[in-house]
Image (cartoon, rainbow, N blue to C red):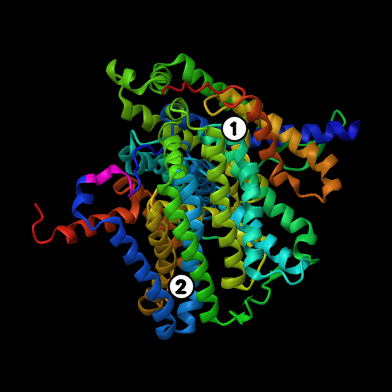
């Protein structure tokens, strides 16, 4: 039982790390209907930039601000150069464009900052300690806290501010939003900027966990099932999806893995997401698509 | 979903078709091209041309055709093409290995059938899951197949890392092991399958695919069986990918491991289809030519002009940036891909010199 709880808690905390990445997706999808595959490479770019600036002797806060600036700039540039000309195109075209973008950003990040693995020390220990009989690390708790805080802040942003109101209006019906005078371009810029920030936060935490390296951009593949289970439009859904995926993935690896030879965490979340989708085709908290002939 | 994109054979330019050569002339010119590739190219080509350019080009074209049937014609996005290629390759290998005396072509066909069954299995969720949610299904296929082929050494006859080696390429007692032989074998298979695909997309099946792509609800209303149509698309598409996988493994590489069919390969095939032209069969060939030739060209350019300036690692990154930008460029400027350019050029030529 003790062991079960430990695996479960470890999984739940890992799941929150996935939620961090998934959040960036949801923001953009909600406001512009773009399924942004490049989110993972944004995470990689931010982490690489941060580490490189830090290694050149800049203090922590300066590196953070500089990376924030870079991330914001990149996100806004993407929106301007690639996605604005694609307005009103079918969603699949938009998705494929972001797939192309992820190649550009990955190539760019590695050309600018090199391809070697960097260590990243946030000053938070990633050493297991014993909390109520379960081993946790400070980084785990910090990441969980950050994910929770981010969701909370974003929920306030979306539900209580004027910008958030226009974001939701755009998400609901871009044409109607335009008609009542919402500045569509400004809204999209804001959304991309915010998702750039979310990407930075995710990049730092993941970088501290795994080291900053190319494989960071692959966590997008971990975040996908999370996103799908939670629903593409739901911010709280990312947390719920993350918890479900994180917990079941670890439990499956520990209890089912040995029976089939291990290494199943690559595909298990996808099968799980598929099973969820068959029951609820729009995710747990997603909006049902209305089909008209 | 890709409602805006129309295949070349549909009404997009009905007026120009009346002026352009009719379809029989077109079919004959395709046959002539095929004959040229079959009889003349082997006489003038060298081993490098066959092994490094033409064979991968043909195989990737075939995979592109497969994905185009699913994504370009039926509107179902797939990120699992490489998984179906892997199934085709490993199934063919096992048929050759475990059924003594089974002719190579039969094995390849059966390999394609296995891939096709896999495709139907992972395509079934498409009946209930729409849009982006569907990529979960094909990604599940991608990761599951790669994992299973690496994990269970039965598939690779006990090889611990899942590496398989080509059987002897023999058809009716003729040996196709030489570069020229492998080229001819690939060309013949790809030629036949392309002919079938060209017929298929013009048949009722093909029209049903396009109807489902353009508006599924409307397709259902006019009585198109959605289940059968989608499953046909998944089956045919995966069959093509499976055969392409077998050829990739045995005619092109000779030795292959499951990781040779990873997600990047799936993306590569998707890029072929996007660059070449969604919903266009010649597009798959144009896209594949592009994907195969551009890296070679870049390498040569770098070797001549940038010696010592750009490291090999950087070159790979530059290539990534270039391909990524091209994808975005094509999607913005020419969503119908290179195929559309070719079509425009042909129209110009056929109207020359009285363009207006």
Name the spot of residue B355 as percent of width and height, x first: 10, 55
Q: Main secondary structure of the magenta part?
A: helix
Q: Is residue B186 magenta?
A: no
Q: Secondary structure at mark 2?
A: helix
Question: In terms of depth relative to the viewer, which is nearer, A136 or B304?
Answer: B304
Q: Nearer the viewer, residue B98 or A12?
A: B98
Does the segment drawn in magenta span residue B10? yes
Task: Bin the neighbour count of mark 2 within 10 Å (Cα to Cα): few under 14, some 14-19, many 20 and up.
Answer: many
List x then y, in percent, for residue A224. 59, 38
Left or right relative to A214: residue B33: left
Mark closer to the observer (1, 2): 2
Which residue is painted at 57% across and 51% down in the image?
B238
Report the span colored magenta: B9-14
The dot on residue A228 is 1
Identify the residue position indicated by label 2 in the image.
B54
Q: In 3D space, how far apart are the residues under numbered discs 1 and 2 (Cα atoms)?
A: 40 Å
Q: Position of residue B90 (x, y in %)?
A: 69, 61
The image quadrant of residue A112 is: bottom left
Residue lying furthest front in this view? B24
Say whether residue A44 is left or right of residue A179: right
Instruction: Please name the residue shown 34% across and 61% down the image.
Output: B27
Subunit bearing disc 1:
A
Which one is nearer the viewer's eye here, A4 or A148? Answer: A4
Q: Position of residue B184 (x, y in %)?
A: 50, 75
């Amino acid at each position: 039982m003790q062991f079960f709880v430990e695996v479960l808690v470890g999984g739940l905390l890992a799941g929150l790390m996935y939620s961090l990445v998934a959040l960036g997706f949801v923001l953009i999808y909600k406001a512009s209907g773009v399924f942004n595959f490049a989110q993972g490479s944004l995470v990689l770019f931010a982490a690489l930039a941060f580490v490189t600036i830090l290694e050149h002797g800049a203090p922590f806060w300066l590196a953070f601000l500089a990376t924030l600036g870079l991330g914001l700039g990149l996100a806004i540039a993407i929106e301007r150069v690639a996605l604005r000309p694609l307005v009103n195109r079918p969603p699949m075209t938009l998705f494929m464009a972001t797939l192309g973008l992820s190649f550009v950003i990955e190539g760019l990040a590695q050309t600018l900052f090199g391809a070697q693995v960097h260590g990243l020390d946030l000053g938070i220990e990633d050493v297991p300690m014993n909390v109520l009989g379960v081993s946790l690390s400070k980084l785990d708790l910090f990441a969980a806290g950050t994910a929770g805080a981010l969701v909370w802040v974003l929920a306030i942003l979306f539900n209580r501010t004027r910008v958030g109101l226009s974001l939701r209006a755009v998400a609901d019906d871009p044409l109607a939003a335009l008609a009542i005078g919402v500045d569509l371009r400004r809204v999209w810029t804001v959304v991309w900027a915010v998702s750039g920030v979310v990407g930075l936060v995710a990049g730092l935490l993941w970088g501290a966990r795994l080291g900053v390296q190319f494989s960071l951009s692959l966590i997008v593949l971990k975040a996908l099932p999370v996103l799908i289970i939670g629903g593409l439009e739901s911010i709280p859904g990312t947390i719920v999806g993350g918890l479900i995926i994180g917990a079941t993935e670890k439990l499956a690896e520990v209890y089912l893995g040995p029976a089939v030879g291990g290494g199943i965490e690559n595909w298990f979340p996808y099968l799980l997401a598929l099973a969820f989708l068959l029951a609820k085709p729009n995710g747990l908290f997603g909006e049902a698509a209305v089909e008209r002939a | 979903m890709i409602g805006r994109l129309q295949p070349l054979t549909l009404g997009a330019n009905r007026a120009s078709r009346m002026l352009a050569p009719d379809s029989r002339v077109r079919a004959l010119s395709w046959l002539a091209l095929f004959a040229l590739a079959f009889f003349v190219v082997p006489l003038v080509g060298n081993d490098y041309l066959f092994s490094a350019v033409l064979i991968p080009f043909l195989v990737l074209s075939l995979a592109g055709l497969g994905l185009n049937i699913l994504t370009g014609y039926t509107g179902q996005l797939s990120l699992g093409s490489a998984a179906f290629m892997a199934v085709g390759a490993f199934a063919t290998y096992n048929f050759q290995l475990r059924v003594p005396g089974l002719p190579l072509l039969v094995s390849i066909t059966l390999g394609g059938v296995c891939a096709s069954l896999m495709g139907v299995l992972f395509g079934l969720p498409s009946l209930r899951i729409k849009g982006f949610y569907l990529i979960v299904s094909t990604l599940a296929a991608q990761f599951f197949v790669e994992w299973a082929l690496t994990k269970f050494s039965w598939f690779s006859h006990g090889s611990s890392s899942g590496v398989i080696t080509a059987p002897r390429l023999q058809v009716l007692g003729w040996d196709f092991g030489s570069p020229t032989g492998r080229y001819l074998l690939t060309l013949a298979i790809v030629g036949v399958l392309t002919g079938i695909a060209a017929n298929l997309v013009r048949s009722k099946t093909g029209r049903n695919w396009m109807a489902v792509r353009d508006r599924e609800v409307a397709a259902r209303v006019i009585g198109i069986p959605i289940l059968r149509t989608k499953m046909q698309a998944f089956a045919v598409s995966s069959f093509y990918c499976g055969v392409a996988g077998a050829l990739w493994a045995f005619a092109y590489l000779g030795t292959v491991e499951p990781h040779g069919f990873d997600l990047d390969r799936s993306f590569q095939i998707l890029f072929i289809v996007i660059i070449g032209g969604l919903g266009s069969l010649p597009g798959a060939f144009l896209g594949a030519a592009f994907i195969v030739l551009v890296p070679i060209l870049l390498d040569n350019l770098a070797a001549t002009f940038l010696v010592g300036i750009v490291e090999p690692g950087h070159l790979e990154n530059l290539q990534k940036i270039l391909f990524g930008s091209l994808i975005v460029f094509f999607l913005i400027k020419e969503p119908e891909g290179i195929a559309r350019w070719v079509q425009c050029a042909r129209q110009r030529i056929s109207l020359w010199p009285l363009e207006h």
